[in-house]
Image (tube, grey):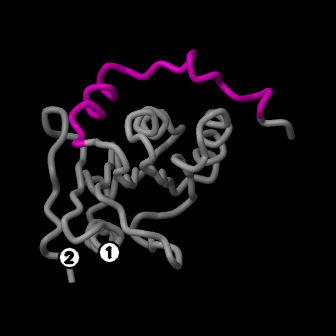
C-alpha cells in the first residue's frame, strides 16, 4: 500500500487548544528524548517532534490500529526524530542499546489516571526504568499537567 497518498499533510493537521496547552507546558528543549505513552493517532508526538530540534520522540500505544494510523499520518515527518511502536506501558522495555528518555508524557492513559489501577504499579515501574535518573513523568489532569512521582519505582 502506498502510504504517502493516504497521509495527511502537516500543514493540514491542527491540534486542539487543550493538546496545545499540554505540549506548551512540557519542559521541551533541543535534543531532549521524549517517551509519549498512549499516543493514539500521533498528534502530540508530531507536534513535539517539531519542537525538539535533533531530539527524539518515541510514541507508544497498545493498539495496533492506533500505531498504524499514527504512522500513516506522520509519513512526511522526520523518522530520525519521530518513531512509533506498539507496546503496553506496563510491559514496556527499552530495546537493546536504546538510550533512556528525559521525560515521559501520558494523556488519558488508563494505567495512570485511575481507570485501571491494577496496572499502575507495573506501568510506573516500566516508565522509571525507561527514563534517565532525573527523568520526569507528566500526566494530564493538572493545569494542564501534573508531574507524577517515580521515586518509589527508581532502582
Residue 13: percent from left, percent from top: 53, 20
Give the percent coordinates (x, y) of residue 147: 15, 51
Q: Are marks 1 and 2 in contact (CB under 8 Å)?
A: yes
- In this orientation, which residue lies closer to the viewer: 83 or 113? 83
In percent of the image, x 58 and y 45: which residue is there? 66
Q: Magenta segment, principal secondary structure?
A: helix
Q: Residue at x 21, y 83 (%)?
A: 155
Q: Secondary structure at mark 1?
A: helix
Q: Secondary structure at mark 2?
A: helix
The quadrant holding residue 44 is: top left
Compared with residue 91, is residue 64 higher up or lower down, i.e. above or below? above
Residue 60 vs 50, above or below: the answer is below
Q: In this picture, which residue range is highlighted in magenta?
A: 4-27
Q: Which mark is residue 139?
A: none
Q: Residue furthest right?
A: 1
The 10 Å Cα crowd at callout 2, few under 14, some 14 to 19, many 20 or more, is some
Left/right of residue 143 with respect to residue 112 in the rendered view: left
Question: Which percent across, then down, holds residue 68?
Answer: 66, 45
Query: 135 and 122: which one is in front?
Result: 135
Name the residue beneath numbered marker 2.
153
Report the residue marked by disc 1: 129
Decide which of tag 1 and tag 2 comes sooner along the chain: 1
Q: Nearer the viewer, residue 51 or 13?
A: 51
Q: Quadrant of the N terminus?
A: top right
Amino acid at each position: 500500500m502506498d502510504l504517502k497518498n493516504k497521509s495527511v499533510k502537516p500543514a493540514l493537521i491542527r491540534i486542539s487548544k487543550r493538546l496545545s496547552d499540554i505540549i506548551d507546558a512540557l519542559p521541551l528543549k533541543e535534543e531532549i528524548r521524549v517517551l509519549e505513552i498512549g499516543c493514539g493517532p500521533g498528534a502530540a508526538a508530531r507536534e513535539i517532534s517539531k519542537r525538539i530540534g535533533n531530539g527524539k520522540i518515541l510514541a507508544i500505544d497498545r493498539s495496533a490500529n492506533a500505531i498504524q494510523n499514527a504512522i500513516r499520518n506522520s509519513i512526511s515527518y522526520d523518522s530520525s526524530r519521530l518513531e512509533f511502536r506498539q507496546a503496553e506501558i506496563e510491559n514496556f522495555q527499552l530495546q537493546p542499546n536504546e538510550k533512556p528518555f528525559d521525560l515521559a508524557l501520558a494523556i488519558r492513559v488508563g494505567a495512570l489516571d485511575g481507570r485501571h489501577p491494577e496496572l499502575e504499579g507495573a506501568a510506573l515501574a516500566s516508565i522509571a526504568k525507561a527514563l534517565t535518573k532525573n527523568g520526569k513523568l507528566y500526566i494530564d489532569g493538572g493545569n494542564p499537567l501534573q508531574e507524577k512521582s517515580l521515586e518509589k519505582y527508581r532502582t
